[in-house]
Image (tube, rainbow, N blue to C red):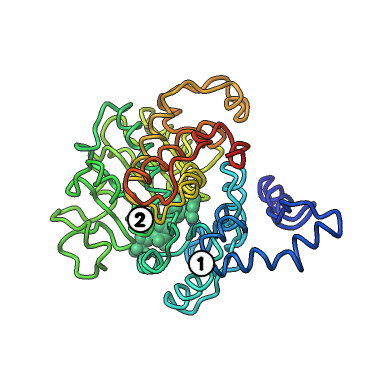
Amino acid sequence: MSDLKTAALEYHASPRPGKLSVELTKPTATARDLALAYSPGVAEPVREIARDADLAYKYTGKGNLVAVISDGTAILGLGNLGPLASKPVMEGKGVLFKRFAGVDVFDIEVDAESPQAFIDTVKRISITFGGINLEDIKAPECFEIERALIEQCDIPVFHDDQHGTAIVTAAGMLNALEIAGKTLEEARIVCLGAGAAATACMKLLISMGAKVENIFMIDRKGVIHSGRDDLNQYKAVFAHETSRRTLADAMDGADAFVGLSGPNLLSAENLMRMAENPVVFACSNPDPEIDPKLAHETRPDVIMATGRSDYPNQVNNVLGFPFIFRGALDVRATRINEEMKIAAVYALRDLAKMPVSNAVCDAYGIDCLEFGREYIIPKPMDPRLITLVSDAVAKAAIETGVATLPYPKHYPLTSVDDVFNG
Ligand SMILES: NC(=O)C1=CN([C@@H]2O[C@H](COP(=O)(O)OP(=O)(O)OC[C@H]3O[C@@H](n4cnc5c(N)ncnc54)[C@H](OP(=O)(O)O)[C@@H]3O)[C@@H](O)[C@H]2O)C=CC1
Ligand SMILES: CC(=O)C(=O)O
Ligand SMILES: [Mg+2]
């Protein structure tokens, strides 16, 4: 077994199985405490909530509790391995929510025989939560699932692989193109993958200025173009007239490559076809579309990112979902809208240009981090993420009328410790 494999299995198994547990937030030392926490005292908040459902936010953990829910149909880039196998990833998302944004998580793996069964299950349990983070659900089913749940629930429902990924990719892409001396409006972009993450990433880039005719999206059958008659409605949006048919065709002269597909699908030969200062986001997890070492050897001018923690430029939704939900929960937003997503993009983009503290550099064993080819996007350990991204999201929710609470008195947050000092 490789060192990482052994260490990863040991990490998950010991000293106790898994990565998350439930903690108590109130005293339980005395009979009096128990009389308040449970019978008879618990009857009082029950009566209050029955009278006014909003009081669940006052008397229970609902307002800080997010469900991370999967059916296991697209676990990272590992494919459809079923709901139970997705549990380590869902627990992992819970770890990140809590560590970076103080958000409590129940991970829920649903063994559903159909998208409708999944929707029904999630809808029925949704009242328990302040928000729902859908995770690792494959396309195209994920689109209808998310749409139906947004419509049926009055709390934020957010498919992280779509929107979290899109927000972080857009922030990184704006910075990478700036370093390459190019613009989103003019960039020719190849997107390998046409599923949940790829569709949302390209849609967001288009809404921020990229031209659909400059985007070549590729699925297992090749380039998505207007001559194809096998496209579902989600892929058809990206079809345009072109004679390019293969990944190699699409890569000729491309300014940016975004990989949201699977491991080792981008060859050195195809990388060679790109324009100067090529931007390569090989975001498939755990194994990228091209090994960064090979990419750098092939193209010394490459601006390279992956989805992983162990290379520079981690373009991964970990930079999004904890802070986006933090902001949305704190103003009790009823949804996460486009304005909130774009506010998060700009907050991430701008943070990468600010000086980085020694503490963050130390956490990564790096002497110095400065905006440039090896640092286009903030590090997840940067404590300013909760300050800037959550604040931007909360403000955008208020400005667009989806917040049901005013701007919090304890904002902007300086750390996770501030979350309950409001
Ligand atoms: N870094 C990050 O933050 C994130 C990374 N990802 C990564 O993106 C990838 C896709 O995830 P997701 O969108 O949720 O999954 P989906 O199942 O929704 O989509 C997968 C897509 O990849 C395409 N694909 C798979 N193999 C190939 C191939 N050999 N050639 C061309 N296209 C291929 C599929 O094509 P077809 O439509 O023809 O089946 C499909 O469009 C995963 O590797 C995942 O780890 C996802 C979210 C976040
Ligand atoms: C990062 C992530 O959500 C994924 O690879 O699916
Ligand atoms: Mg995912």
Say whether mark 1 is within 8 Å of ligand 3.
no
For mark 2, give the secondary structure: loop
For mark 1, give the secondary structure: helix
Residue at the image position 43 percent from the left and 29 percent from the top: 351
Residue 254 percent coordinates (x, y) = 25, 40
* 45, 311: nearer the viewer: 45
Quadrant of res 119:
bottom left
Pointer 1 local density, CA inside 10 Å: few below 14, some 14–19, many at least 20: many
**In the visual, does 227 lie left or right of 96?**
left
**In the visual, does 29 lie left or right of 82?**
right
Specify which label sits upstream in the sequence, 1 or 2.
1
Say whether mark 2 is within 8 Å of ligand 1.
yes
**In the visual, does 281 lie left or right of 87?**
left
Query: In whole angstroms, how far apart are the C-alphas of marks 1 and 2?
Result: 31 Å
Query: Label 2 sits on what residue type?
Result: Gly
* 69 in relation to 338, above or below: below
* 349 in relation to 77, above or below: above
Residue at the image position 32 percent from the left and 59 percent from the top: 219
* 248 in relation to 378, above or below: below
Q: What residue would you read off at disc 1?
A: 126
Residue at the image position 80 percent from the left and 57 percent from the top: 33
Query: Label 1 sits on what residue type?
Result: Ser
* 25, 211: nearer the viewer: 25
Q: Nearer the viewer, mark 1 or mark 2?
A: 1
Q: What residue would you read off at disc 2?
A: 193
Residue 147 percent coordinates (x, y) = 35, 65
Taking the view exactly as shown, the residue that stands out farthest to the right is 30
Could you tell me if residue 262 is visible in this image?
A: no
Residue 398 percent coordinates (x, y) = 37, 44
